[in-house]
Image (cartoon, helix red, strand yellow):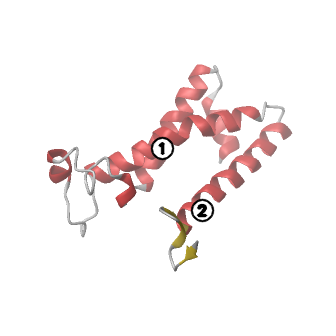
């Protein structure tokens, strides 16, 4: 194990500090929201259920947004990504080489929460208020 300025190396696994911060923030926010849900008489398990439903669409949305709208100073544009779909070093599937967008994560996560609320017949606006 070694630590550098950006993360922790555990053999071939590299855990970046911003990833640790994001996971910590998600768990903290879900804990607070679950407490708020309980305080207003709602089932706090829905907070944790919705969070699990938002993770995969959030990650997919983050990568998709980055691929379709890469930053201006990025070496590859959307056209390059679409022409190299199976390039496992830098292509659209190579999430490990970087490139996630907070806007795509937000929209993908929101889609996951929407689908969860529809599945369990919850009023989305009430749960978004608790989450906020």
Q: What is the distance, in whole Å, between disc 2 and disc 1 at their CAs?
A: 16 Å
Indicate whether 113 appears above or below 103.
above
Q: Where is residue 107 in the image (x, y as percent from the top left)?
A: 45, 43
From the viewer's perspective, tell me whether residue 84 is left or right of residue 25.
left
Indicate whether 73 appears above or below 128.
below
Indicate whether 114 appears above or below 72.
above
Q: Position of residue 91 (x, y in %)?
A: 25, 52
Q: Is residue 9 visible?
A: yes
Decide: few, some or many residues near mark 2? Use Cα within 10 Å; few <14, some 14-19, many ≥20: few
Q: Which residue lies furthest to the bottom in this view?
A: 5
Residue position for label 2: 20
Give the residue at x 16% y 53%.
80
Give the residue at x 85% y 40%.
39
Decide: few, some or many residues near mark 1? Use Cα within 10 Å; few <14, some 14-19, many ≥20: many
From the viewer's perspective, tell me whether residue 86 is left or right of residue 127.
left
Quadrant in which the N terminus is drawn:
bottom right
Task: Name the secondary structure under disc 2.
Answer: helix
Q: Which mark is residue 115?
A: none
Q: Position of residue 15 (x, y in %)?
A: 53, 63
Residue position for label 1: 58
Question: Quadrant location of residue 75?
Answer: bottom left
Q: Which of marks 2 and 1 is in front?
A: 2
Mark 2 and 1 residues: CB-CB less than 8 Å, in contact?
no
Indicate whether 86 appears above or below 14.
above
Q: Earlier in the sequence, mark 2 or mark 1?
A: 2
């Amino acid at each position: 194990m070694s630590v550098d300025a950006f993360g922790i190396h555990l053999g071939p696994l590299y855990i970046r500090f911003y990833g640790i911060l994001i996971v910590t923030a998600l768990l903290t926010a879900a804990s607070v929201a679950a407490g708020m849900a309980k305080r207003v008489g709602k089932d706090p398990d829905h907070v944790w259920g919705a969070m699990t439903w938002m993770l995969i669409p959030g990650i997919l949305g983050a990568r998709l947004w980055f691929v379709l709208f890469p930053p201006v100073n990025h070496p590859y544009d959307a056209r390059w990504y679409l022409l190299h779909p199976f390039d496992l070093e830098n292509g659209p599937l190579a999430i490990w080489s970087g490139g996630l967008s907070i806007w795509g994560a937000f929209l993908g996560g929101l889609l996951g929460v929407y689908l969860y609320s529809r599945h369990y017949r919850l009023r989305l606006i009430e749960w978004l208020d608790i989450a906020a």
